[in-house]
Amino acid sequence: MTVAIEMGYTSSGAPATLDLEELLATRLLVQGNSGSGKSHLLRRLLEQSAPWVQQAIVDPEGDFVTLAERFGHLVIDAEAHTEQGLQLAGERARMHRVSTVLNLEGLDAETQLRRAAAFLGGIFEVDRGHWYPMLVVVDEAQLFAPAAAGEVSDEARKLSLGAMTNLMCRGRKRGLAGIIATQRLAKLAKNVAAEASNFLMGRTFLDIDMVRAADLLGMERRQAESFRDLERGHFMALGPALSRRPLGLRIGPTQTQPPNAVPRLTPLPGAALEDARAVILAAPPPEAARPQRRAPAPPAPDLLSQLMAAKPAGAENRTETAEAPPSPEELAERRKRLERILTAILADPEAGFRAIGVLYQDFQVRCRIEGLRSGAPDLDTFRRMLTRARAGISAEMAEDDAWQDVSARAAVLPEDMQGIFMMLARAAKEGLPCPGDPAIARAYGTHSLGRARRLLTYMEEQGLIVCQLDGAGRRIVTLVELAWATAPGDPNTEEAQADLAGVGGGE
């Protein structure tokens, strides 16, 4: 099916469309000096394509955060997350097909490069089973893929340039369609720009940028000066998703606006300020009276929690009309039945790699078959049951004071990582070998052994565990404060998976 989204109108007044399917198979480069309407063009493209395809926007100035209210994008404030957290957020967003805006506003240049690289890396490295079509928009791309070294460190520049190169050169097979926008073509790395097959060129004044834009559009160099005459919001288009010949178009209106509108001329006050010298040059207030700097934003909730936290519709009504509470015997029987259902679900070898929403649907169906339709746990409860089950902790074990302490410590981690911490805790408490990377990856729901190792690194950075290798290269994990340590285990074996197999029960 061909999906044509309207970008505006051609010079002749005909609708100007962009073939979304063709764009997903190619890439897009947008160029225009400040004030040319470049960000407006990106906003129009994002709004028109939002119902059709998942989107990720790398936003250095916070211009696109307003898409959240109208189109449901999840805004990720990069200032509130570590690089490791952003990489995991990129992976989860791709897995759960959530459109996101990575807001880099307020960060210095080097931190922007590092955190954008981490987020793009997570999107790029997700397992093959989650290679769904996705538009990845990078505004001010010359910052993230600079043609030459600048004020940032070489390490940060290489990280960011590597992520942008992966997006534009290798992203197509992974379903990623890169859309990069820049003020200066001359400042954008050539190997990144060269991968684009579609071009939208706006108003440009510098000779070097005009000549390069003309070359990309296949225009003669004597025609390059025409880019100076383009009005705001007018672009020259070329590419398989736009037009086979250079085509002038005017971008249409948008439904949302950036949080900071373009400044307008405002008349000065009619009356002159009395004693302006005394007001403007007054002594500064004492140090204690100075306003404090804005406190850092609290850490954003775990992405998976944001996706899955909603209770089923009508849950409140069912609670209000509930009958008398069940007896202890009925609760025990219900717990056993729920435990059997969860055991049957996890017996499927592929269960570890399915999204929690899919598993919960299967769980609900099985509950109805078992006659537990009115007593089936909600999604939050099911998620906690599943976390314990994947860690091999039974319902009886979970009620023990020691495991209550473990659960409280695990709560500082993102929801989908808590089961891994509990798996390590069980191995340590029972003196079992440390789970290998394959076992950790399976419990996390991924085939990537590298991601399993990154999970351990993240937990170590949070001060929850310490990883060590013995003389034979076997891994030992010690839980900080609890002083529990696993027996040495081969990081490359799945043997620990069998040792830790077990299912936790209901709530």
Image (tube, helix red, strand yellow):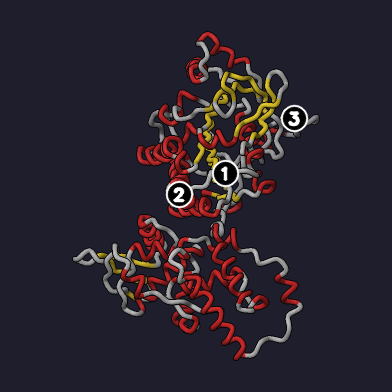
Do residues under tags 1 and 2 come within 8 Å of each other at their CB atoms? Answer: no
Looking at the picture, how far across and down is residue 67, in whole percent?
65, 44
Say few, some or many: other residues with alpha carbon within 10 Å of mark 2 (under 14 / 14 to 19 / 20 or more): many
Looking at the picture, how far across and down is residue 278, in whole percent?
68, 36
Q: Amino acid at mark 1?
A: Gln
Tell me if residue 355 comes above or below residue 315 in the rendering.
above
The quadrant of the picture occupied by the N terminus is: top right
**In the foreground, 272 or 282:** 272
* Eye-nearest disc, 1 or 3: 1
Q: Amino acid at mark 3?
A: Thr
* Residue tagged 2: 122
Say few, some or many: other residues with alpha carbon within 10 Å of mark 1 (under 14 / 14 to 19 / 20 or more): many
Name which quarter of the figure residue 358 lies in: bottom right
Q: Mark yes or no: residue 293 visible.
A: no
Looking at the picture, how far across and down is residue 15, in whole percent?
70, 26
Tell me if residue 502 comes above or below residue 453 in the rendering.
below
Q: Secondary structure at mark 1?
A: strand
Disc with the residue nearer the chain's start (1 vs 3): 1
* Residue tagged 3: 266
Q: Separation of disc 3 and disc 2 at Cα?
A: 45 Å
Q: Separation of disc 1 and disc 3 at Cα?
A: 37 Å
**In the foreground, 236 or 260:** 236
Tell me if residue 495 comes above or below residue 403 in the rendering.
above
Disc with the residue nearer the chain's start (3 vs 2): 2
Residue 55, numbered label: 1
**In the foreground, 295 or 472:** 472
